[in-house]
Image (cartoon, grey):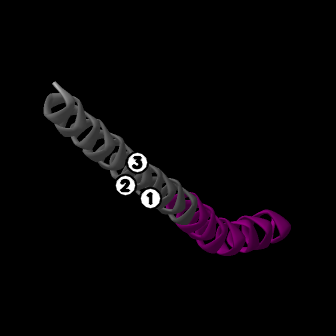
């Protein structure tokens, strides 16, 4: 009986370690996804600014010419 309890205790400890490792992996993946989303948002904003700035200058030049 004591041997069974010791084996069960070892299994429970291993399960707890596996769960902790899984949680850490999940947290790292979530942080990576969040960083990826921030990078994407920054790239989209930069692209809009790169297109919008010259477009405004062209529109102002066209409108100002009339």
Q: Height in image: 61 above or below 14?
A: below
> Residue 28's mark?
1
* Disc 2: which residue: 25
Determine contact: label 2, label 1, CB under 8 Å.
Answer: yes
* Chief secondary structure of the magenta portion: helix
Residue at horizontal 37%, vertical 55%? Answer: 25
Indicate left or right for 26 with 60 as reference.
Answer: left
Local crowd at mark 2 within 10 Å, few (<14), some, or many (≥20)? few
x and y percentages locating residue 24 in the rendered image: 43, 54
Cα–Cα gap, marks 3 and 1: 12 Å
In the orientation shown, which residue stands out farthest toward the top? 1
Secondary structure beneath label 3: helix
Q: Say whether residue 63 is magenta.
A: yes
State the separation of the CA atoms marked 2 and 1.
5 Å
Pick the front one: 50 or 18: 18
Label for residue 20? Answer: 3
Q: Nearer the viewer, mark 2 or mark 3?
A: 3
Sequence-earlier tag: 2 or 3: 3
| Image position, residue 28 (x, y; %) | 44, 58
Q: Nearer the viewer, residue 37 or 41?
A: 37
Whole-percent x, y for residue 62 in the image: 73, 68
Q: Which mark is residue 63?
A: none
The answer to which image quadrant residue 54 occupies is bottom right
Quadrant holding the N terminus: top left
- Of the image marks 3 and 1, the number of the one nearer the N terminus: 3
Question: Closest to the observer: 23 or 14?
Answer: 14
Q: Which residues are magenta?
A: 40-66
Mark 1 secondary-structure assignment = helix
* Tag nearer the camera, 3 or 1: 3
Q: Residues within 10 Å of mark 3 (few under 14, many from 20)?
A: few
At horizontal 84% and vertical 68% (from top left) the residue drawn is: 64
């Amino acid at each position: 009986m004591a041997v069974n309890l010791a084996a069960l205790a070892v299994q429970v400890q291993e399960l707890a370690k596996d769960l902790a490792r899984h949680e850490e992996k999940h947290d790292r993946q979530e942080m990576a996804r969040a960083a990826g989303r921030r990078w994407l948002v920054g790239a989209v904003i930069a692209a809009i600014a790169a297109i919008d700035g010259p477009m405004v200058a062209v529109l102002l030049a066209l409108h100002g010419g009339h």
